[in-house]
Amino acid sequence: MKKMPDDRGYFGAFGGRFVPETLMAPLAELEEAYRKAGRDRGFQTRLDELLEHYVGRPTPMYLARRLSARLGGARIWLKREDLCHTGAHKINNALGQALLACEMGKGRVIAETGAGQHGVAVATAAALLGLECRIYMGSEDIRRQELNVVRMQLMGAEVTPVDAGSQTLKDAINEALRDWVTNVRSTYYILGSVLGPHPYPMMVRDFQTVIGREAVVQIKKAARGMPDLVVACVGGGSNAAGIFSAFVSYPAVGLVGVEAGGRGITPGDHAARFSEAGAPGILHGTRTVVLQDDDGQILGTHSISAGLDYPAVGPEHALWRENTRVSYTHVCDDEAVAAFHLLAESEGIVPALESAHALAYAVRVAQSMPLNSNILVNLSGRGDKDLAEVSRAEGDAP
Ligand SMILES: *Cc1c(COP(=O)(O)O)cnc(C)c1O
């Protein structure tokens, strides 16, 4: 299989670098620093040590016996990214990029955040490495995710509200890009998913492939072979890219990416980019599949899980879908909430609502698969952050 992306940062017709002229040189410099770090044993060793002793890797591969028995079909295995420090896979990437910032001699990092999970991971890495840190967050999101705002501030990060547009993630990204253009000499921009201009989609994927590398070894040993299916939720697509990339070269392993179906597939009610409203377009520096209307205006999105609520998807996923190596589907809010309860009751594990989308798909298909088959679900994060949202959805709280 050809190594992706190509030298210009393209995954087939997707990806690239669509940014103002002032960012072309900084992105080239970033790419160079990243490639140099890849060849530097010292950098890799330092990152591996932090992943082991600070993040808590390798994360376990867990056989959900009671859940599997209840469904009566394939065995369901969980890759436990929920057990990472800070509660999700995002720290793998935040730490990698923060180390790279140090390597490049930048004393300040900035990031965007939606629900606050990436902001928390970046604030954590910045505190650990002694970097100045500013997080851009939509004011609407700040209101919805107060706990994460307090967490970031506790670690010394400055949280800057963004009042523009819909006051959510995509507006926060615009603001972070603006800051970067202005302060590019002192500042490193830590992007949170496999999005944005080259080299971000490649770099974020690479920092997340630790999930897949561990998972291949673990499942081979525990299930005595490769899984029949690997399932992951797809927001920007970083946890999915991290686990899929280790399995893409095994054609017998089915790969399924699960997007947010929200309230259903009507414009504005979902974030399923690969459903009918998604078409090629450019958003935040990359050419990919974007939810848009007939005039190319970006559509509003909805999902009960903030981490999946974004109108574009990583460019590598657009290619995987085009060449049919990965199939994509969606799960609606209700089905995700049901899976959230099912895992809590049958295994004593409360998943993030994002991860519950992947789990819901496994629940949907497990029964129709043979008893000795294996489904591996990437449990990208834990659900403590979602308790209030779930009660709200069920009408138990304001
Ligand atoms: C942010 C987040 C996601 C979605 O982001 P990806 O880049 O698609 O992985 C999924 N799960 C959790 C727990 C998250 O915090």
Image: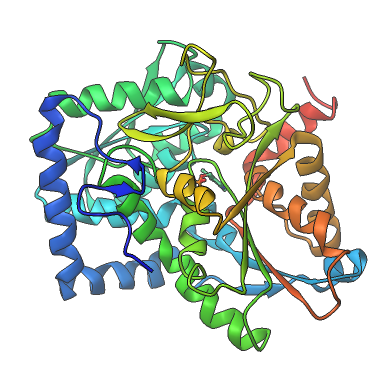
At 57% from the left and 34% from the top, the residue drawn is 273
Q: Is residue 88 above or below residue 14?
A: below
Residue drawn at point x = 58 percent, y = 37 percent: 308
Which percent across, then down, holds residue 184?
12, 32
Rendered image quadrant of residue 75: bottom right
In the displayed structure, 286 sits above or below 174; it is below
Can residue 217 be seen in this snapshot? yes
- Quadrant housing the C terminus: top right
Image quarter where the N terminus lies is bottom left
Give the image location of residue 78, x and y in percent: 67, 67
Color theme of the render: rainbow
Q: Residue at x 13, y 63 (%)?
A: 36
| Whether residue 193 is visible | no
- Most foreground residue, 95 or 218: 218
Return the x and y of residue 166 as percentages of the image width and height. Answer: 49, 13
Q: Is residue 315 left or right of residue 103?
A: right
Number of numbered tags placed on the structure image: 0
Q: Is residue 232 left or right of residue 350?
A: left
* Above-or-below relation of 297 to 370: above
Q: Where does residue 205 sit, x and y in percent of width and height? A: 38, 56
Depth check, front residue: 229 or 212? 229
- The residue positioned 24% from the left and 71% from the top of the image is 44
User: Relative to 12, is 163 above or below?
Assistant: above
Q: Which sits in the foreground, 291 or 331?
A: 291
